Every structure is written in structure tokens, then in C-alpha cells.
Image (spheres, rainbow, N blue to C red):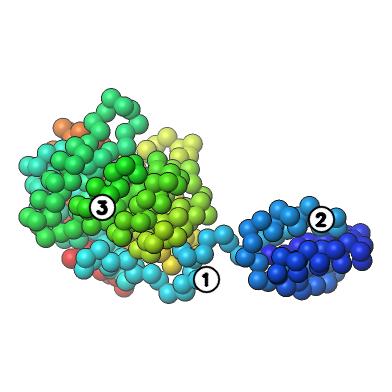
Amino acid sequence: MLVLLNLDVTKEEIDHIYERITGFGFVPHMIPGETRDAIGITGNQNPAAKTQLEVLPGVWKIMPVTKSYKLSSREFHPQNRIVKVGDVSFGDGNVVMIAGPCAVESLESTVGIAKIVTARGAQLIRGGAFKPRTSPYSFQGLGEDGLKILATARQETGLKFVTEVVSPDDAELVASYADMLQIGTRNMQNFRLLEYVGKQGKPVLLKRGMSATLDETLMSAEYLMKNGCNDVVICERGIRTFSDHSRNTLDIAFIPAMKKVSSLPVIVDPSHSGGKRSMVIPHSLAGIGAGADGLIVDVHDNPEEALCDGPQALLPHEFEELMKISKGVCAAMGKTIGR
Ligand code: PEP
Ligand code: MN
């Protein structure tokens, strides 16, 4: 923390500021400036100190020099964190492909789609059993029956699955079935939910809030990590902007920016970002090009009748095409994709 002093600060005021800083158990270091002096502080572990110091006479303003996120930061953990879901690793140079329906609709369709994506190289299955829908009249998901269906799809394909937790009440139930727990965009700042989910002992896919900054996203990751979950994967899924040509705006800059300050893997959801089938491949390639560690893609064999997000679901042959084109981009970057 840096305490910037007023231009006309007096010797008495500086003495008093020093007294308060040492009183907190911190060490002050005077930094003379050309126009303005400052006091650098080390050893500051007390979150209340900033507010108490900034009101002292002679203080112009306080500048934090370290961020409030720690466990998720690259400063704390310089190497990339590798997050494992079974034998699938995020962050080790392979672009992980997660694919499946937006929602679990029935045993037949879910197992069918799971087989389709498995045969084309997916490494994990996706599908919502508890759906966070904007309208209370929309399909809300099959709940525990949906989890059972996903468990059957896992058995039939050998692939592990990720599914969303929408409420602290369901966290334990979902964790008893799922291999990876998803926090959706609408719940990124549901802090009680993050605490519950962090305690479940499962890797977590944390989707960026649709209006969340990079720092806010990392603070949410911090909630998970503080509660015992070191295996967090961040997902850029598009944010709300004034653009109306796509469902959301895929924030490509978020990927390298996040990877610079945090060692957590970052993946892209090219389905929820564009909201249109035609945008999924371009968004995927852009994400891979920007350094994403994986993709999570909606796939459906009959999107016209899908109960959720049909317009953005790839058809099986389009998913095959995505795998094929992505391989080229990945190869150019010295990476691989899928199985
Ligand atoms: C989803 O992945 O099923 C989903 C609801 O996505 P988001 O939370 O990003 O809208
Ligand atoms: Mn969806």
C-alpha cells in the first residue's frame, strides 16, 4: 500500500501517520518524490487499515499496490494451475473440448448427443439438470432425474460431465453425481452459493458474470478457493454490451488479460456468447487464438425442438467441422484439441 501525502503535509502530521502505521504492526518506508512525498507500507494484512489511514490529516490518498485476490493470482502461484477432471487436464497445452446439450431433456436425447460428441473427440460432456432460466415459465430442468441421466451418459461414453448448481440447497446433491460443478453467469456473485460449491471437493467451472469485470471474476474465484477448491476453471461466455448483432459480446481481450494476472485456466463458451449457430465456429477459433485452454459448446441432434437454446446448438456434422478446423488453429499454436 502506498500513502500519498498532501503537498503541504507537516512534520507533525507525518509523525502521526508513522505512529498509526507502526501501531497496525506495519513497516513504513518514506519515499521522497519530486513534487509529492509518499510512504510505502509493507506487511499490511489488515483490511481495515486503508480506511483508517486515508482519513488522517496530511494524507492525500491511498493506493493499494497489491490486489485483493491472492490464491487465484499469478503472483501467488506463478506457474499455470493445471485443473484435472478425471484424466482430462485444463491448462497443460491441450485445448479441452466440452460438448453436449444446453439442458438435459430426456435419457434418449442426452445419451444420444453424448455419444455423438464422444465419437467426434469431446473430452467432457455438458448439460444442465438445474437450469437458471430468465423466465419462470421456461423449462427449468429435470433436477435429480437429469443428474441420473448424465450419470448414465457417463457410463455409456466413459466421459465425465460438468453440470450447473443453481442453489446452495442442491450443491451437495449435484456434487454427489457430477465430476465438475458449474457456476452460471447469473450466479457468479452469489457468494453463499460459491462458498457451498467451494466446499464440495469437486473442480468448478466458473462462468464470468455478464457484466463482471476481471477483478470481480477473480474475487468470485477467490471465494471458491478460500473454501477449499483450488481447481477452478474460468469461462468467458460473452458480456452485455450495446451490440445487438449477437446474444452477448465475446470479450476476447479478457482471455490474455486474465491469464496474465491469474494462473487459473480460462476457457470460452462460443455458444452462449454469440447465441447463434453461425457464430460458434468463429468465436471458438478466436478464443483458441487468444490462448483459451478449452471450449464448452452446445450440441444438439434436433435443435429445432430443443427445450433450451436450440438456435445456438451445433448439429453433429457442424461439431465435427469445428473439431476439424480447430485442430489446424491449435496446431499453429503448438497445441492439441480434444481426444
Ligand atoms: C449454460 O452453460 O448452460 C448457461 C446457462 O450458461 P450461462 O450461465 O453462461 O448463461
Ligand atoms: Mn444455454
Ligand 1 closer than 8 Å to the CB at disc 2? no
Between discs 1 and 3, the one toward the N terminus: 1
Instruction: Point out which mark residue 175 bears.
Output: 3
Amino acid identity at mark 3: Ala
The residue lying toward the viewer, choosing from 11 and 310, is 11
At mark 1, the secondary structure is loop
**Mark 2 surroundings within 10 Å by alpha-carbon count, few (fewer than 14), some (14 through 19), many (20 or more):** some
Residue drawn at the location 11% of the way across and 60% of the way down: 158
At mark 2, the secondary structure is loop
**Mark 3 surroundings within 10 Å by alpha-carbon count, few (fewer than 14), some (14 through 19), many (20 or more):** many
Callout 2–callout 1 Cβ contact below 8 Å = no
Which residue is tagged 2? 56
Picture quarter containing residue 308?
A: top left
Residue drawn at the location 35% of the way across and 56% of the way down: 199
Between discs 2 and 3, the one toward the N terminus: 2
Instruction: Point out which mark residue 75 bears.
Output: 1
Examine the rendered structure and indicate whether residue 15 appears above or below residue 60: below
Measure the alpha-carbon separation of dots 2 and 3.
Answer: 49 Å
Specify the quadrant that holds the N terminus: bottom right
Specify the quadrant that holds the C terminus: bottom left
- Residue 176 seen: yes
